[in-house]
Amino acid sequence: MRELWSREDERDLTEFLDAVRREDLVGALFAIEGTPPVSRRLAEAVLDDAAAAVRERAAGTRSSFQKARLLARVLAEELGFAGDEDDYYDPRNVLLGPLLERRKGMPILLSVLWMEVGRRAKIPVAGIGLPGHFIVRVGPPPGTLADPFAGGVPLTVDDCRRKVKALAGGRVPWRADYLRQMEIPALLERVLRNLSGCRGRTGDEAGRFRAVTFLSALRPDEPENLLSRAELAEELGVRGLAREVWAEIVERFPESTQAQAASEKMAEEDEPPVFH
């Protein structure tokens, strides 16, 4: 197995946090992936070309509905970006570089595509994180809601309400603030949670560890993320690192249930072996 956490990983994490501070969504996503410079330039060219195609035809598109349809025409119909319904949990579906190469992805990454192409084409596109699904709003509020995973089909508020009800089995009551724009840190948190889940499904625990480490750095005040990191390190046999993280939890969050769990883990390790 490769080194669980290397100097290269640490550099990627530093770059990620710098990008978050600059509100550079694309830079943060490339840092999560550890994308090398040559691949970044190729990916940026795909975004630039798509934005140029939108800009060329944007004259006369005054309404948010027209702009949403233009984005759908270029990105979905002409360039072929679509939701991956065949292998939804493939980790590549939540990574920007593979999305731009394969033209398939999860709702959140396809929404990021719309947001970034819109930004470059001077069309405001906001990410909207519904429970269980991710969509966009084109134009200032109320704008036009659209579903990039479904080819950019326009949505009404009632459509969104029904989608949340269906996905949650009616267990999540509708709230108007579900339609608020999601800020970049919250969006990246959702990306990292999706990535961690996908890599866990494929048995890539080292990849999951990386995602959880980025998540704990993004949300440093949430001890649950640190505990997940320690548990993964322990599972992978890197007990020294696990102990370091347990100690950090106890020091920083002494009153939390996670600190209690970490203390119990360290106590187990301190127990002398029993010989029969």
Image: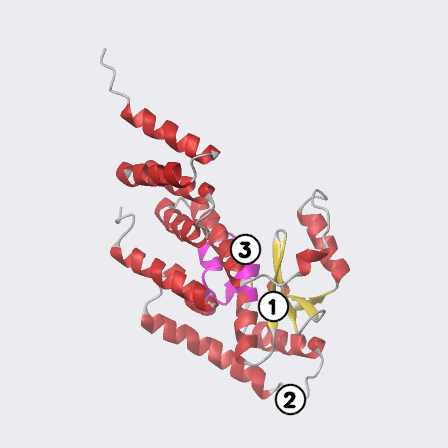
Q: What residue is shown at x 67% (from left), y 46% (from top)? A: 168
Q: In the image, residue 9 lies at what x, y percent? A: 31, 56
Can residue 98 be seen in this snapshot?
no
Is residue 186 in sight in this rendering? yes
- Type of colouring: secondary structure
As drawn, 159 above or below 225: below
Task: Provide the residue span drawn in magenta.
Answer: 84-111
Which residue: 57% across, 88% down?
56
Looking at the rendered image, the disc whose residue lies closer to the viewer, 3 or 1, is 1
Q: Is residue 251 magenta?
A: no
- What kind of residue is marked 1? Ala
Dot 2 amino acid type: Ala
Q: Nearer the viewer, mark 1 or mark 2?
A: 1
Distance from Cα at disc 3 to Cα at disc 2:
37 Å
Q: Which residue is mark 2?
A: 59
> Is residue 156 toward the left or the right of residue 224 in the image?
right
Mark 3–mark 1 Cα distance, whole angstroms, equals 27 Å
Q: Could you classify mark 2 by the number of other residues whose Cα lies within 10 Å: few (under 14), some (14-19), or many (20 or more)? A: few
Q: Reading the chain from its start, which is encountered first: label 3 or label 1? A: 3
Task: Identify the secondary structure beneath mark 3.
Answer: loop
> Which residue bears the numbered disc 3?
86
